[in-house]
Image (spheres, rainbow, N blue to C red):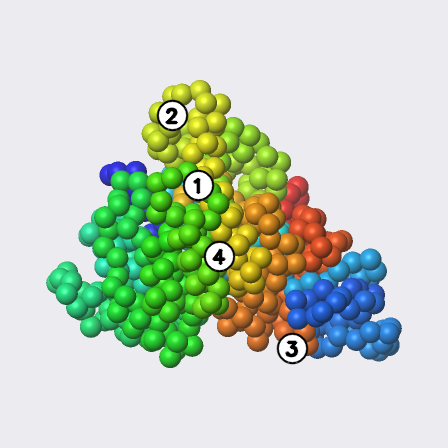
Amino acid sequence: MTMMQRIALFAIAMCWLTPGVRPSAAATVEDVWIEHVTVVSPERASPLRDAEVDIHDGRIVSITTGGSPGQAAGAPSTVTTIDGTGLYLAPGLIDSHVHLGAIPGMTNEQEARHPDIAQLARDQIPRSYLLYGFTTLVDLISSPQGMARWKDHDVVPDTYFCGGASLMDGYPMNYRPKAVRYRAFPYMLVEPDMAAPPDIAPEMHTPAAVVARMKADGAICVKTFYEHGFGTAHDLPVPKAETIRELVQAAHAAGMPVLMHASSIEAQSFGLGTGVDIMAHGLWNWNDPSRVTDLTPAAKALLDDVLAKNVGWQPTIQVLYGERDLFNTAFLSDPLLARVLPSGLIDWYRSPEGQWLHDAYSERFGGKDRDPKVLETEANRRYALPIDRVSHAAAYLASHGGRLLFGTDTPSAPTYANPPGLNGWLEMQRLVAAGETPEQIFRSATLSNAQALKLDQDVGTVEVGKRANLLLLHQDPTQTIEAYAGIVKVLLGGRVLDPAELVANRSH
Ligand SMILES: [Zn+2]
């Protein structure tokens, strides 16, 4: 099996998970009364100071100011009161691009060989997203079975999924052996001129049929792909424009947005021409052999079209760091990593088996046996170009009113350098470095994401009627992303969570 096939095995495992689910534990939903807090919410022109927020049955039922006696008198004894003096109350964050089926850096086979390490990791990963403030996640390629397994833990962010409409034998299903790939991609598209395998009914794989099936399965969105491939696979079939136009039409009729995997000028241009709603990646492939990183006329023209059509755009800069940092000799020793992953998993990453992707990618840089410092320097040099390009593209959209959406693509490959939750914090740092303001990041991870995924009836702001997915912070998140580095409390549907109970490797 080639390396790309091994990688793909992992990627596809995300949407082909075995059921085998225990009934989930009943969550504790408390009534919560927060007083003397400053409300920071994207629909407000300025913060609301000294506010009282009343939460009942997991939703916000009132927001008042002026020391309303509301809950103080006659409040039932089960109410948790939080003194918000000096604190900010913000909506919980939404990561609109994650993959939750697999443990970052582990293949299915490796997970089967290390069930104890894997179990601890699977119990921790949902908490790690919450630890960094992510109370809502959207898995872009999943299934009802995948969601059931993910949600089978005591504390899990609110999670939604898209169905993955890959073109038959195209990216990313090409990486699976033919014997299993068709079963693994239940929502694949078969175009009229394609010869489907005997056990596949083409009429079940038209754009209208796959959208109907996703909708019936509970998906909220459609993910499709335009990718010729990379590495050893670079001539993969891509869908016809007509196919994607039909997919978009069917999805919109069903009330579902369409996201497209597209990271090149060619791919994003195709997406714009077919009416997709969201580019699920930034633009790092400029289809240009030069090493120019200032916007080329072609890149600028594409981004101007993104702006004109007001298409959502996820920079996903951490995709590139997730590959580069396999060669970062300090990455596994970062104390932040130990906050989000069990120490047993981090130890396994250091083992020869856990270094498998590092070793595979090393082939690009002269082989795994070279001095680690030399490999690190080489990787930093190779990834500088696409990182600069995607950063400049994101900055251009940020400074021209683009509809930026916060998505990390965690993990974008089976790499341990895209750790759950922490990867969002790292992405924020990349966005700031690229020129996005903390306020733009805040909006992109809250209201903009909620609107783009049609979740804004429930989440994305601190407003009466919304689900109480909230963050209590020491700092104003519209002023600094440091606000997310030390969250005071996370509220998930009104359930108050302390970071001390979310962090990995906690002592009992
Ligand atoms: Zn992805």
Spatial CA span between label 2 and label 3: 55 Å
Spatial CA span between label 1 and label 4: 22 Å
The residue that label 2 is drawn on is 368
Badge nearest the viewer, 4 or 2: 4
Name the disc covering residue 314, or none. 4
48 is higher (above) or lower (below) than 227: below
First reached walking from the N terminus: tag 4 or tag 3: 4
Q: Is residue 410 left or right of residue 265?
A: right
Is any atom of residue 473 visible in this view?
Answer: no
Q: Is residue 377 left or right of residue 266?
A: right
Neighbourhood count class around disc 1 (C-alpha, 10 Å): few under 14, some 14–19, many 20 upward: few
Spatial CA span between label 4 and label 2: 32 Å
Badge nearest the viewer, 2 or 1: 1
Spatial CA span between label 3 and label 1: 49 Å
Badge nearest the viewer, 2 or 3: 2
The residue that label 3 is drawn on is 465
Can you tell me whether the CB of the residue at mark 1 lies under 8 Å from the nearest atom of ligand 1? no
Amino acid type assigned to the residue bearing label 3 in the image: Gly
Amino acid type assigned to the residue bearing label 1 in the image: Val
